[in-house]
Image: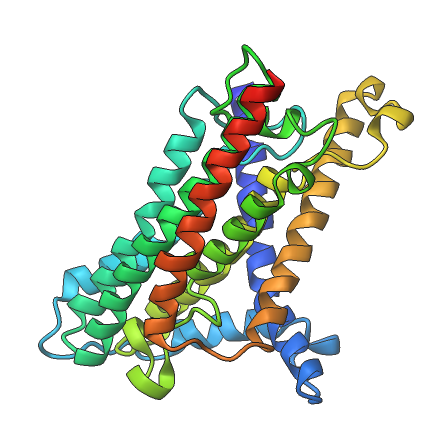
Amino acid sequence: MDFLFWLILAATALVVLTITAYTTLLERKVSAYIQDRVGPNRAGPWGLLQPLADVVKLIFKEGFQPAQSYRFLQYLAPILMVTIAVAAIVMLPISPHIQFFSGSVGILYLLGLLSMSVYGITLGGWASASKYSLLGGLRSGAQMISYELAMGAALLSVLLLTAYLQSGGDFLEPRAIVEAQRKAWFVFLNPIGFFVYLVAAFAETNRAPFDLVEAEQELVGGYHTEYSAIRFGAFYVAEYLNVILSSAFIATFFWGGYLGPFEGALGVQGWPVWAQNLWGAGWLLLKTLFFVFLYIWVRWTLPRFRYDHLMRIGWKVLLPLAVGNLFILAGILLILS
C-alpha cells in the first residue's frame, strides 16, 4: 500500500511537471496567436519538442554570479521556490478517493506554505547584490503581503460556506470544501469572494498585469536579473508551477474541484472507484487548464499597472471588498440558520 501511495504521488508530480513544461509552450503559442505571429514550430512537429529544447539549452548554458553576491543564498532562492510549489501538490484533492495528505489543518498548512514563496523571491533579489534585483525583491514582499490579506479574507468566506453546508465536518480540509459544493459550486454562492480570490491570485503569482517585481522597462528583469542557466530555469519553472497550482486551487475552492456536472443524474457515486477517480481527475484537470489559459490570456491583453496603483487596488479596493463580503455572507448564513 505504501509503495502504491508513493507511486501515485511520483506519477502526479511527473504529470504536473510535464504540464508545467507544456504550459510554457501554450503561452508562447497563445501569445503568438493574439499578436498574429506563428510561434514556436521548429523543434519537433508543431513545435511540441520546444520545452525539451529549452531545458537542454538551460542545462548547457554557463552559470554566472556577480562577484559581490551571496553565493549560497543565491543558489538557495530558486530551490526554495520550486520546493514550495511542488510541496503544495500534496494538499490537492485530485478525485473523490485520491488526496495524498489530509487533516484538520489542511488549509492552514497550505496558506502557510504558499506564503513562504515570498522568501524565495526576496532572497533571490537581495542575494544578487544588484539594485535592480533588490528593488524587485522588495516590491515582491510588499505586493504579496498586501494581496495575501484579501486572498485570506476571500478564503475565509469559502470556509464559512463549507462549515455551514458541512455541519459537523472538518471544514479546514480541502476535500470537505469540494464535497460541500455538491449541490452548488461556490462561484454561484459567493461570486464576490471568487472575484477577489482570482485577482489576488494573479498578484500572488506575479503575473501581468501585476508583474511589477520583474518590470523589464524599470528593473531590467527584477529579482532574477542576475540569474542565468539552470538557476534561471528553476525560477521559470516555479512561476509556471505556481500558475498551475493557483489555477487548481481556484477550481477547488470555487468551481467544485473534481466534481463534474450532472453527477446525481449519471449516478457517478455508484461507479467503480477507478472510474470515479478518472472522472474526478479529468474534470479537475479541465478546470485547471481553463484558468491557466485565463492567466495567459490576461497577460497578453492587459497592460501593467503602475506600482502605486497596484498597492492602492490591494489595500483600498480588494481588502475592503473581501472583508465586507465576509461579513455580509456571515450575516446571511446566520439568518438562514
Q: Position of residue 47 (x, y in %)?
A: 68, 77
Residue farthest top in this picture: 168
- What's the residue at 32%, 73% (across, down)? 308
Looking at the rendered structure, the number of numbered marks drawn on it comes to 0
Q: Quadrant of residue 222?
A: bottom left
**270 versus 244 height, above or below:** above
Q: Quadrant of the C terminus?
A: top right
| Percent coordinates x, y for residue 73 in the rendering | 17, 60
Residue drawn 47% across the image and 67% down it: 207
List the single residue furthest toward the left. Answer: 68
Which quadrant of the figure contains the N terminus? top right
- Colour pattern: rainbow
Q: Is residue 22 above or below residue 228?
A: above
Percent of width and height locating residue 183: 74, 27
Displayed quadrant of residue 110: top left
Which residue is at the front of the view, 260 or 210?
Answer: 210
Residue 4 appears in the picture as rendered: no
Residue 212's quadrant in the figure? bottom left
The residue sitting at 78% across, 35% down in the picture is 279
Residue 134 seen in the current view: yes
Is residue 330 or residue 11 the one in the foreground? 330
Closer to us: 26 or 12: 26
Residue situated in front as seen by the camera: 74 or 171: 171
**Direction from residue 129 to residue 52 in the image, left or right:** right
Q: Give residue 320's position: percent from left, percent from top.
A: 41, 49
Residue drawn at (61%, 59%), measured in percent from left and top? 292
